[in-house]
C-alpha cells in the first residue's frame, strides 16, 4: 500500500525510498558517476593512441610494466568504455533518471504505477553495474572481446567475459522492470484531460523508448544465456565445427553459428540506438519549446515520426552485418528499411529546426545545449547513411568512420541533450538556479572539444584506419599521413575532460546557493512546472491533482496577457 | 494519497495497473522465448545433422508432464473463480493442487534430466541437447518462480483476503496469467523438442 511517510530516517528517505523523485536522483547520480568513469577509461586509451608505447603519466603504475598500457588491457578498457557509457551511463540517465523524475510530474501522476518495483529496478541496475566493474579484478581482466562480444572470440575469452554476461543479465532485467513501470504509468496514470495528443513530447519519447526496451532487450538476454551456456556448460551454440585456436583444434561438439549471436545481439542493439536518442529528442523538444516561446512546429508529425521510428528500428538490425556474406537479397531488404528509417529522423530534426523560425529565442545554458544537439545529431545521422548502404559500408566497416558516426549521435547528440535536461530541470529538483556563466563556459568548451575528438575520426576512417587498434594505426602504411590526428583527438579528449570541471563546479556551488523561491522560473507550460509546489516536492507531488485543458506548448497565444498558458488552465 | 487504479479498472483502458503490467511483462517473455525458438530454428536449419527428439528424449514422461501442467492451469482458474464466489476454502484447495501439480512436473523433470546424465548425454554433447537443456531449464526456472509466488499467496499472502479482498483477487488473476503463460511455453516446447 502506498502511504505517506513522516519523519523518515536517512536510509528510508534517500537509500531505500520508493518515491519516484528520489529513485530518479539515485539513477541520475549513479549514472553521472559511471559516465565520468567510462570517460576516464577512454582518456587513458587515448594516451596510448596518441603516444604509442610510452608510459602513461600519473596512473601508469596501475596499468602495467613501465607504465605502458598493455594491449590486453587496452581491449578491456575499450569494452568497458562502451558498456559503461551505454548501459551504465546514458540509458540509466536518459531513461532511469529523467523518466522516473519528470514523467509522473508531466502527466499529473502522484508516483509511478509500481513504486516498489521501481526501487528494485534501481537496485538491480546498481548491482549489475558493480558486477560489471568486478570484471577488472578477475584473472585476465575485464571482458576484452569488443563491446559487441562476438563469438567465437568471446566464447574462448578470459573469465571477465562471464562476469560481463552476468552483469548484462542484471542490467537487462532492471531495464525490463523500469520499462514496464513507465508504460503502465503513462497508460494508466495520466490525469483527467491528459489525452494522448496532449502529452508533452518528452513523455512520448520515454513511452516509445520503454516499448523498445521491453521488446528488444529479451532477445539479448536469450543470447546472453546461450553464451553463458557456451562458456560454462560447454555447449556449442556459437562454436562452429573444426574451429582452430592458436594452432589447436577445439574439442567442443561444434555445429553452432557465430552469426546467430550477431543476429540476436543487433536485434537489441539497433533499437538500443533509438533508446539512446528518443529520450534526447524529448528533452530537447521540452527545452526548445520553452525557450523559443512559441509552439513546436509539427507536434503530430513529431509524435507519429517517433512511433514510426520505434517500429522501424526492429527491422533494420542486419545493416550492422553486411560483411558477413548475407547475400544480396537480404542486403537489399535491410538497405531499404535503413533508408526508410532515416526519414522520420529527418522529419523530427526538421520540425525542431523550423520551430526556431520566428521564435524569440532565449539563449540560456539549457537552450545552448539543445541548439548544439541539432547540428551534432544531424552530422551523426547523415554520416550514418553511407554505413547503411552495403556498397559504401564495405569500405567503411570497422574503421574510425563508424566510431565517429555513432559518437556524434550519442556524445554531442544525446549527452548534450542530457546536459540540457539537467540545467533545465535543476531548479525543479533543488529550488536553486545554476550559474549561467559557468554553464556557458561548459557548453562552448564541450562543443569545441567534442568536435575536436570526433571530426578527425571521419578523416582517419575514410583513410582506412581500423577501430580497436592498440598502436593507433602505426601498422597502416596507407594511413600514415593521417596518424598525426591521433594526437589532435587525444588532446581534445583530455581538454573535453577538463571542460567538465565547469559542470562539476557549477553543480556544487549551485547546490550550496540560496533557494530562489520560484516555482516556475522558466515560465513553462507543462504540469511539472505549473502545478507542483516549490521544491523539495513531497510525496504525492501535487497539492491538488491537476486537470488538463490544453496542449503542452501553448506559448505566445494571440490575445493572451502572458506568453505562456499552463496545460491545466481552463480556456 | 493512493496510486489510482491499483484495484479498480481505469475506464478508458478497462484494466487495473497490475494486469496491464503483467501483460507487458509477458510480452517481453514472448520476446525472450521467441529469441530462443529463433535460435533453435537457426541452429537446426544450419546443422549438418539433427536428431529426432523422440529418439533421445522420453516422450511418455513428457506427455505426463504436459498433462500435469495443463491440469495445473485448470486448477489455477478454479482457485481464482472460487475467490470470486467468496469461497476461501476451495480457493486454498485449488491453489494447493496447482502447487502440487507443479511439484509433480519438477519431479518428472528431475527423473528425465538424471536419466540423460546417466547415459552421458550432457548439454555439451550436441546442439540439440544443448538447446533442450537450455530451453527446458529456463522454463523450469519460470515454473519454480511461479511456485514461489503461489506458495506466498497460499500461506503468508492470504491474509490480504481479510484486509483487501478485491485486490487479493486481482493478485490471483495476475499470477494466473503468468501461470498460463508458463503452461503455454511448455505446450510449444513439447512438440518442438520432443516430437519434431
Image (tube, helix red, strand yellow):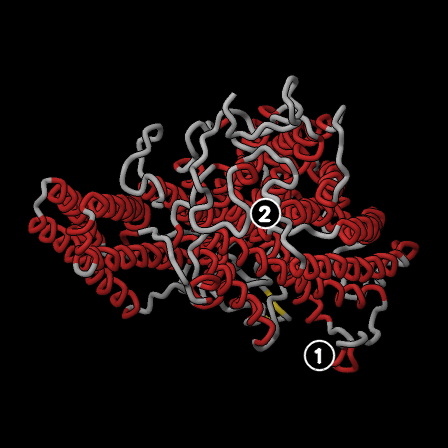
Q: Earlier in the sequence, mark 2 or mark 1?
A: 1
Expressed as whole percent of the image width and height from the top left, the position of residue A402 reads 73, 48
- Distance between the Cα atoms at labels 2 and 1? 41 Å
Name the residue tied to disc 1. Answer: A62
Instruction: Inspect this view and state whether residue A149 appears.
Output: no
Residue found at x 88% / y 56%: A485
Expressed as whole percent of the image width and height from the top left, the position of residue A45 reads 75, 65
Disc 2: which chain? Answer: A
Residue found at x 69% / y 71%: A73
Q: Residues within 10 Å of mark 1 (few under 14, many from 20)?
A: few
For residue B146, above or below residue B122: above
Name the residue tied to disc 2. Answer: A428
> For the image shown, how many numbered marks are present on the structure?
2
Q: Is mark 1 on a helix, strand or loop?
A: helix
Residue found farthest to the top: A559
Quadrant of the rendered structure where residue B146 is? bottom left
Residue found at x 17% / y 49%: B72
Quadrant of the rendered structure where residue B107 is? bottom left
Quadrant of the rendered structure where residue A44 is? bottom right
Q: Is mark 2 on a helix, strand or loop?
A: helix
Disc 1: which chain? Answer: A
Amino acid at each position: 500500500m502506498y502511504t505517506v511517510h513522516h519523519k523518515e530516517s536517512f536510509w528510508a528517505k534517500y537509500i531505500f525510498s520508493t518515491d519516484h523523485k528520489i529513485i530518479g536522483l539515485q539513477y541520475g547520480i549513479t549514472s553521472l558517476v559511471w559516465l565520468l568513469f567510462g570517460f576516464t577509461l577512454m582518456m587513458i586509451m587515448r594516451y596510448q593512441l596518441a603516444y604509442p608505447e610510452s608510459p602513461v603519466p600519473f596512473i601508469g603504475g596501475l596499468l602495467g610494466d613501465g607504465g605502458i598500457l598493455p594491449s590486453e588491457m587496452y581491449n578491456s578498457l575499450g569494452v568497458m568504455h562502451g558498456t559503461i557509457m551505454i548501459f551504465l551511463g546514458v540509458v540509466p540517465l536518459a531513461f532511469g533518471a529523467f523518466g522516473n523524475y519528470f514523467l509522473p510530474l508531466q502527466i499529473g501522476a502522484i508516483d509511478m504505477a509500481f513504486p516498489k518495483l521501481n526501487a528494485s529496478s534501481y537496485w538491480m541496475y546498481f548491482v549489475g553495474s558493480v558486477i560489471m566493474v568486478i570484471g577488472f579484478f578477475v584473472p585476465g581482466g575485464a571482458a576484452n572481446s569488443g563491446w559487441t562480444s562476438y563469438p567465437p572470440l568471446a566464447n574462448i575469452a578470459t573469465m571477465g567475459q562471464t562476469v560481463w554476461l552476468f552483469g548484462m543479465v542484471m542490467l537487462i532485467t532492471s531495464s525490463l522492470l523500469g520499462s514496464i513501470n513507465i508504460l503502465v504509468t503513462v497508460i494508466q496514470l495520466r490525469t483527467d484531460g491528459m489525452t494522448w495528443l496532449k502529452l508533452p513530447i518528452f513523455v512520448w519519447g520515454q513511452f516509445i523508448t520503454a516499448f523498445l526496451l521491453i521488446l528488444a532487450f529479451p532477445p539479448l538476454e536469450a543470447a546472453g544465456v546461450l553464451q553463458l551456456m557456451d562458456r560454462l556448460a560447454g555447449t556449442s551454440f556459437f562454436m562452429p565445427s573444426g574451429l582452430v585456436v592458436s594452432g589447436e583444434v577445439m574439442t567442443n561438439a561444434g555445429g553452432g553459428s557465430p552469426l546467430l549471436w550477431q543476429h540476436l545481439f543487433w536485434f537489441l542493439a539497433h533499437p538500443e540506438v533509438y533508446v539512446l536518442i528518443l529520450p534526447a529528442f524529448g528533452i530537447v523538444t521540452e527545452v526548445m519549446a520553452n525557450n523559443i516561446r512559441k509552439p513546436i512546429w509539427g507536434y503530430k508529425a513529431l509524435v507519429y515520426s517517433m512511433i514510426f521510428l520505434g517500429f522501424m528500428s526492429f527491422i533494420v538490425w542486419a545493416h550492422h552485418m553486411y560483411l558477413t556474406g548475407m547475400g544480396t537479397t537480404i542486403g537489399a531488404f535491410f538497405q531499404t528499411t535503413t533508408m526508410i528509417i532515416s526519414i522520420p529522423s529527418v522529419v523530427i530534426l526538421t520540425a525542431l529546426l523550423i520551430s526556431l523560425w520566428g521564435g524569440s529565442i532565449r539563449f540560456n545554458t539549457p537552450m545552448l545545449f539543445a541548439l548544439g544537439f541539432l547540428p551534432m545529431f544531424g552530422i551523426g545521422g547523415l554520416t550514418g547513411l553511407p554505413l547503411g548502404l552495403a556498397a559504401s559500408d564495405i569500405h567503411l566497416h570497422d574503421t574510425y568512420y563508424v566510431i565517429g558516426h555513432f559518437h556524434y549521435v550519442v556524445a554531442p547528440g544525446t549527452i548534450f541533450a542530457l546536459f540540457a535536461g539537467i540545467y533545465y530541470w535543476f531548479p525543479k529538483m533543488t529550488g536553486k538556479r545554476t550559474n549561467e556563466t559557468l554553464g556557458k563556459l561548459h557548453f562552448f568548451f564541450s562543443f569545441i572539444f567534442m568536435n575536436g575528438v570526433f571530426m578527425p575520426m571521419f578523416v582517419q576512417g575514410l583513410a582506412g584506419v581500423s577501430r580497436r587498434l592498440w598502436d593507433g594505426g602505426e601498422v597502416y602504411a596507407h594511413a600514415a599521413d593521417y596518424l598525426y590526428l591521433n594526437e589532435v583527438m587525444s588532446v581534445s579528449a583530455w581538454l573535453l575532460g577538463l571542460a567538465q570541471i565547469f559542470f562539476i563546479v557549477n553543480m556544487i556551488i549551485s547546490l550550496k546557493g540560496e533557494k530562489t523561491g520560484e516555482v516556475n522560473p522558466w515560465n513553462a507550460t507543462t504540469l511539472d512546472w505549473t502545478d507542483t509546489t516549490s521544491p523539495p516536492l513531497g510525496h504525492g507531488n501535487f497539492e491538488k491533482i491537476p486537470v488538463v485543458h490544453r496542449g503542452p506548448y501553448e506559448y505566445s497565444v494571440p490575445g493572451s496577457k502572458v506568453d505562456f498558458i499552463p496545460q491545466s488552465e481552463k480556456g | 494519497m493512493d496510486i489510482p487504479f491499483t484495484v479498480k479498472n481505469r475506464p478508458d483502458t478497462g484494466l487495473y495497473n497490475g494486469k496491464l503490467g503483467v501483460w507487458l511483462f509477458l510480452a517481453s517473455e514472448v520476446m525472450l522465448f521467441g529469441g530462443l525458438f529463433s535460435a533453435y530454428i537457426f541452429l537446426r536449419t544450419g546443422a549438418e545433422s539433427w536428431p529426432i527428439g523422440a529418439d533421445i528424449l522420453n516422450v511418455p514422461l513428457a506427455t505426463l508432464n504436459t498433462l500435469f501442467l495443463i491440469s495445473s492451469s485448470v486448477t489455477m482458474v478454479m482457485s481464482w473463480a472460487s475467490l470470486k464466489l467468496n469461497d476461501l476454502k476451495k480457493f486454498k484447495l485449488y491453489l494447493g493442487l496447482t502447487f502440487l501439480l507443479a511439484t509433480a512436473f519438477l519431479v518428472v523433470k528431475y527423473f528425465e534430466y538424471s536419466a540423460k546424465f546417466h547415459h552421458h548425454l550432457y548439454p555439451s554433447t550436441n546442439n540439440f541437447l544443448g538447446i533442450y537443456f537450455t530451453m527446458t531449464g529456463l522454463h523450469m526456472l519460470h515454473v519454480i518462480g511461479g511456485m514461489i509466488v503461489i506458495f506466498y499467496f497460499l500461506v503468508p499472502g492470504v491474509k490480504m483476503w481479510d484486509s483487501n479482498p478485491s485486490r487479493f483477487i486481482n493478485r490471483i488473476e495476475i499470477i494466473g496469467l503468468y501461470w498460463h503463460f508458463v503452461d503455454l511455453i511448455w505446450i510449444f516446447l513439447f512438440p518442438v523438442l520432443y516430437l519434431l
